[in-house]
Image (spheres, rainbow, N blue to C red):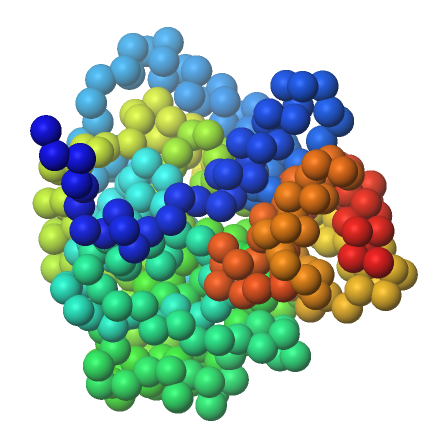
């Protein structure tokens, strides 16, 4: 039997975030007191009213297959949320529920990107965008972002990055790993270019509920963008529901119909009782989620203050669950040494397309302790 695999396997590396998490888990099994700052997994339990809704669904025996696009009631709740909060008038039929936003992003890329298509990705960027494009047979055109601008592109950056050859632009605001929140003027400049050059925008809005400075603007709400924007979100980060695997995707009806064919032949659907919890999350009390946001805001401030006191100049994250910290050295070796000697788990910046940095997540109540250990390594 041949041991040769698909061609894309040679072009895609395993997730560095997963590797660092595995190393941290090994140290914990050996008894080490590891401060985990390597994954963007909120250290909050899912609120009680959401858990209760899922339990009630289980008690009612809702354990079978739901419709492939998702429960209509959940899709209606998502459509209402998009219409009311994001200025994206959405019909429930234009929504597909997915097992997490990562799969929604994968579906979007697989549906849109053809062999040889150019996909522009601002970097630093989340570790999985580029592999998704390569798996689909596309060609990644990285757009390097500058720490001096807070890792937000300028109009000139955008102008030089795209062309008539661009098929897709991947937009992530608030950004993982930098925490940058794009201003409305930046998104308007991108929208104008998308119309002029006739390309799609894939808007990953997973961190929209976790903004500390500025405002979230959905690019699909801007003039000329409804017909060329794919919006992806989930209940993972801002609702403390990472393990529930509940994402969703919306866009023009023709795109949604095409994506549905892929989902029907792959994962089929998200779990039905989890979707009942999703309805409760979207329609129930907001206070638990606001408390979560305020906690991460406080941790962001602690991180910036500790690094500043240590003489480390870090672009201030305006949102999201992470900061991108300059370490001025081999970032892979730095992360490994920091984990082995100081027992702090982070992720090398190389995995996000930028050497000499590490991503530090705010998802632990030991942020101050972890950052103090990290700062000592930099010094």
The quarter of the displayed image where residue 363 is located? top right
In this rendering, the answer to whether 364 lies above or below 353 is above
Count of number-bearing discs: 0
Residue 94 rendering spot, x and y as whole percentages: 22, 52
Residue 359 visible, this angle:
no
Horizontal side of residue 130 vs 126, given as left or right: left
Residue ID at (80%, 64%): 312
In this view, the residue in front, 259 or 38, is 38
The quarter of the displayed image where residue 55 is located? top left
Residue ID at (29%, 41%): 97
The quarter of the displayed image where residue 292 is located? top right
In this view, the residue in front, 242 or 146, is 146
In this rendering, the answer to whether 346 lies above or below 179 is above
Residue ID at (25%, 78%): 166
Horizontal side of residue 82 vs 348, given as left or right: left
Residue 296 rendering spot, x and y as whole percentages: 69, 47
Horizontal side of residue 362 vs 210, given as left or right: right
Name the quadrant of the C terminus: bottom right
Residue 325 rendering spot, x and y as whole percentages: 68, 60
Name the quadrant of the N terminus: top left
In this rendering, the answer to whether 350 lies above or below 237 is below
In this view, the residue in front, 213 or 278, is 213
Horizontal side of residue 39 vs 12, given as left or right: right
Residue 270 visible, this angle:
yes
Residue ID at (46%, 30%): 243
Name the residue at the right extreme: 309
Residue 68 rendering spot, x and y as whole percentages: 18, 35
């Amino acid at each position: 039997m041949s041991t040769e695999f698909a061609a894309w396997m040679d072009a895609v590396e395993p997730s560095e975030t997963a590797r660092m998490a595995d190393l941290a888990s090994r140290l914990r099994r050996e008894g080490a007191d590891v401060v985990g700052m390597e994954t963007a997994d909120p250290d909050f339990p899912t609120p009680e009213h959401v858990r209760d809704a899922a339990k009630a669904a289980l008690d009612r025996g809702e354990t079978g297959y739901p419709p492939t696009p998702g429960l209509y009631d959940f899709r209606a709740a998502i459509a209402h949320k998009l219409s009311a909060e994001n200025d994206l008038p959405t019909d429930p039929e234009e929504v597909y529920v997915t097992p997490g936003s990562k799969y929604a992003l994968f579906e979007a890329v697989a549906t849109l990107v053809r062999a040889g298509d150019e996909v522009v990705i601002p970097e630093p960027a989340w570790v999985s965008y580029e592999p998704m494009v390569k798996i689909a047979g596309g060609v990644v055109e990285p757009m390097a972002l500058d720490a001096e601008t807070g890792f937000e592109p300028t109009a000139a950056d955008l102008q030089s990055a795209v062309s008539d050859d661009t098929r897709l632009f991947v937009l992530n605001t608030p950004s993982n790993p930098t925490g940058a929140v794009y201003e409305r003027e930046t998104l308007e400049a991108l929208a104008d270019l998308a119309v002029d050059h006739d390309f799609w925008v894939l808007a990953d809005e997973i961190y929209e509920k976790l903004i500390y400075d500025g405002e979230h603007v959905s690019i699909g709400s801007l003039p000329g963008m409804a017909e060329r924007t794919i919006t992806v979100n989930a209940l993972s980060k801002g609702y403390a529901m990472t393990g529930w695997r509940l994402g969703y995707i919306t866009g023009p009806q023709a795109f949604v119909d095409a994506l549905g064919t892929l989902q029907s032949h792959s994962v089929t659907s998200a779990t039905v009782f989890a979707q009942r919890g999703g309805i409760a999350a979207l329609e129930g009390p907001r206070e638990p989620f606001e408390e979560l946001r305020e906690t991460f805001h406080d941790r962001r401030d602690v991180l910036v203050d500790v690094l500043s006191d240590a003489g480390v100049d870090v672009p201030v994250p305006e949102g999201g669950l992470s900061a991108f910290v300059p370490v001025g050295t081999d970032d892979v070796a730095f992360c490994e040494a920091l984990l082995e000697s100081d027992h702090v788990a982070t992720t090398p910046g190389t995995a996000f397309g930028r050497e000499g940095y590490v991503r530090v997540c705010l998802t632990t109540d030991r942020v101050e302790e972890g950052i103090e250990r990290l700062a000592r390594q930099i010094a």
